Amino acid sequence: MQENLSLYHIFYTVASTGSISHSSRDLYISQPAISKAIQKLERNLDTVLFNRNSRGVTLTPDGELLFEKVKAALMLLDEGENSIRHNHSRNIPKLRLGASSTLSKYVLLSHLKDYIDQFPHVRITISCQSTYQTLQLLDEEKIDLGLIGRPQKLRGYFFQPLLQIRDTFVCTEQYLQNQKKLYPGEPLLQTATFMMLDEDNITRQTVNTQLKDHLVELSHILEVTTMDLLIQFAEIGLGVACVIRDFVEKELEEGTLVEVPVGFSFPPREIGFVCRQKDVDSPLIAPFFGEAANTDL
């Protein structure tokens, strides 16, 4: 039995591919060596396992019987190996994070670098979701820590402010000049295309509230899925984009983009790390709150 184990693997591969030449490539074994292995197994079992022809090989009745048994045995071996790997992986510390793609790029990235330097053995996964979806994943215990814009209600969570951000509208100087030429004397709020995140985003909802409170109504709105696209669309002159000012400071300093007044200034709002209240003291999560607590707002 023991001397046949490697032969069974070769037999299974040949039976699965129906071709000695294909099996040779898959197994990195020469075709003559495979043929000799099959012949040896047939001698050991005193039977013929394959019918040979110019198009390849097919199983004989005995070959089909052996194939089913070998297939089941190999599947059991795979299950055994996977079980061992699973047991080993359970011993590896895991941290599941949730954050929007925007916050992941502009905020989370730098914190993750420091965290990985301190805890290189921790396996980290990241779910890119909106604030409300991140909170839902926390509720369902599918993630351990979130980076979110602070919503109005956070019952059952621990939220540590990390920094303050402010919303603004931006576009190119050329776009403003074009609007003045196309619509002389008409208000920009009525003529321009205003690009904003979709309605489910907390940033959009916050901006909508401010616009409503200040009786500002935008006539032409184009919804865009990500902050990065908003910035890029604004840079090519597609319209006026509602963005987080902190994330376009370089573009504003260089003059690539300019701020567009809408009659009022948006108040600052907080973003920070959030977790379930019961998980605050987790050794994998606490370092993020320690960093946040020491951050100047």
Image: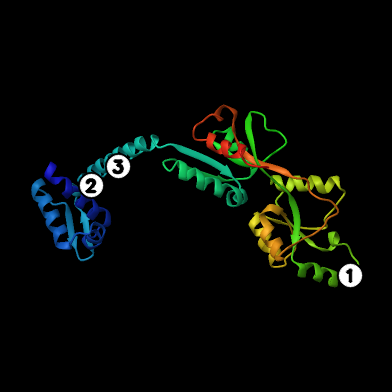
Image vertical order of residue 155 relative to residue 81, above or below: above
Q: Which residue is mark 2?
A: 67
Image coordinates of residue 110 in percent, x first then y, are 55, 49
> Pointers 2 and 3 in contact (CB under 8 A)?
no
Q: Quadrant of residue 127?
A: top right
* Amino acid type assigned to the residue bearing label 3 in the image: Asp
- Which of labels 3 and 1 is toward the front? 1
Q: Name which residue lies at 11% across and 49% down.
A: 47
Q: Tell me the element at label 1.
A: loop
Seen from this angle, which residue lies furthest right? 185
* Type of amino acid at the residue the image marks with label 2: Phe
In the picture, the disc for residue 184 is 1
240 horizontally vs 161: left or right: right
Front-most of residues 82 and 105:
105
Q: Secondary structure at mark 3?
A: helix
- Type of residue at label 1? Pro
Front residue of this view, candidates 120 and 195: 120
Residue 136 or residue 1, whichever sits in front: 136
